[in-house]
Amino acid sequence: GLFYMENQLEDFIISNWENTELGKKYDLIYEEGELKSKQFRTEIGIIDILAIDKNTKSHVVIELKRNQTSDDTVGQVTRYMGWIQDKYGDDNVSGIIVAGKYDEKLYYAQKMLKNIEVFLYEVNFKLNEYKR
């Protein structure tokens, strides 16, 4: 199953951050108790989620695609990574693409960029009959 809208995927990931693979390695950014990671605004666009690596303290740009992605997504992620590098002086910034499907174009684009990971999400839904 896939999410109908990208913002549903984003809300689900943020709400369940600590229970995801992302939450094991990365922290969300809070300032004065307010979440800053979600829809992080830059001069060149909006980063879906900006996180911090728990070990290296480097930034992680996370782009979400509710369905199939393509190699143009790599261009978007690297653009944001370049901006973070300039704005924050973070030479170890990395990127993550979270998508519902993976295609060959993305495979070959990602192959040359060792600091971009791809995660595929899967939605499982189950109904259990209520019995007393």
Image (cartoon, rainbow, N blue to C red):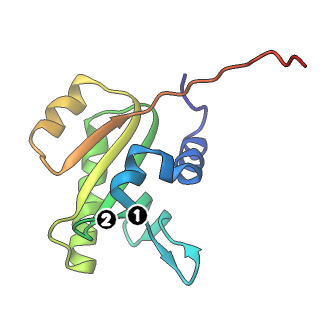
Q: In which quarter of the image is residue 119?
A: top left
- In the displayed orientation, state which residue is furthest to the right: 132
Q: What element carries label 1?
A: strand
Q: Is residue 91 left or right of residue 77?
A: left
Q: Mark 1 points at which residue?
A: 27
Considering only vertical position in the picture, is 7 above or below 102?
below
Crowding near the residue tagged with mark 1, few <14, some 14–19, many ≥20 C-alpha atoms within 10 Å: many
Q: How far across and down, in percent of the image, does residue 58 sit? A: 25, 68
Q: Which amino acid does label 2 sit on?
A: Lys
Considering only vertical position in the picture, is 67 above or below 98?
above
Q: How far across and down, in percent of the image, does residue 108 sit? A: 14, 31
Q: Is residue 131 left or right of residue 60?
A: right
Q: Quadrant of the C terminus?
A: top right
Q: Quadrant of residue 54?
A: bottom left
Residue at figure coordinates x 27%, y 69% from the top left: 83
Considering only vertical position in the picture, is 99 above or below 51?
above
Residue at figure coordinates x 25%, y 65% from the top left: 55
Residue at figure coordinates x 59%, y 49% from the top left: 11
- In the displayed orientation, state which residue is furthest to the front: 132
Q: Quadrant of residue 64?
A: top left
Q: What residue type is labelled 1?
A: Asp
> Of callouts 1 and 2, which one flags the residue occurring earlier in the amino acid sequence?
1
Q: Is residue 116 left or right of residue 27?
A: left
- In the displayed orientation, state which residue is furthest to the bottom: 32
Considering only vertical position in the picture, is 59 above or below 89?
above
For the residues labelled 1 and 2, say whether their Cβ atoms are less than 8 Å apart. yes
Q: In the drawing, what numbered circle is on residue 57? A: none
Q: Name the residue under label 2.
A: 54
